Image: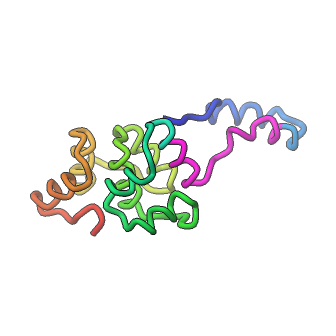
Amino acid sequence: MFKFGKSTGELFTELKKEKNLRDWRTNNREEFVLSLGEYLEKILVDKNLTKQEVIEGSSLNREYAYHIFSGKKKNPSRSKVLALAIAMGLNLDEVQYLLRYAGHGVLYPRNQWDAVIISAIEQKLNVMQTNELLNSLGETDLLA
């Protein structure tokens, strides 16, 4: 999965020592946070996936999902980000990172709904199977 070249700690250390902010920004332009859409595009490339197959696998409205990828929809809900993550086959660490990247809380095993999602990710279930598991345990669907 896409990772930045420098750690946040390294950037902090350099920034605190830097006298010329303009040069620091120029030298580190690859280290700045991408939009969510750009980040998702990098994951697609890294995982050798197409937008179409991920969108179909996510059960999201096609137009809405394309808006997320294009950056027109900047703050999709946590459950929509999870649907995309599951459709991309991300592992739990990758899902947690994507949730933080999208500005959402990570999955928390003390939350019953989150615990089911964690289990589904670990079992490599798709979105439909995840919803079946949620339903069987009396929880709401991923995209309810």
The residue lying furthest to the left in this view is 136
Residue 74 placed where, x, y %? 55, 64
The residue lying furthest to the right in this view is 20
Q: Count all numbered tags in the image, as a single digit.
A: 0
Residue at the image point whose x is 58% and y is 61% from the top: 71
123 on left or right of 86 = left
Residue 81 is a magenta residue: no
Residue 104 placed where, x, y %? 45, 56
Residue 125 placed where, x, y %? 22, 45
> Observer-nearest residue: 116 or 64?
64
> Observer-nearest residue: 40 or 144?
40
Q: Which residues are magenta?
A: 24-43
Residue 27 is a magenta residue: yes
Residue at the image point whose x is 41% and y is 54% from the top: 52
Q: How is the image coloured?
A: rainbow
92 on left or right of 131 = right
Residue at the image point whose x is 44% and y is 51% from the top: 99
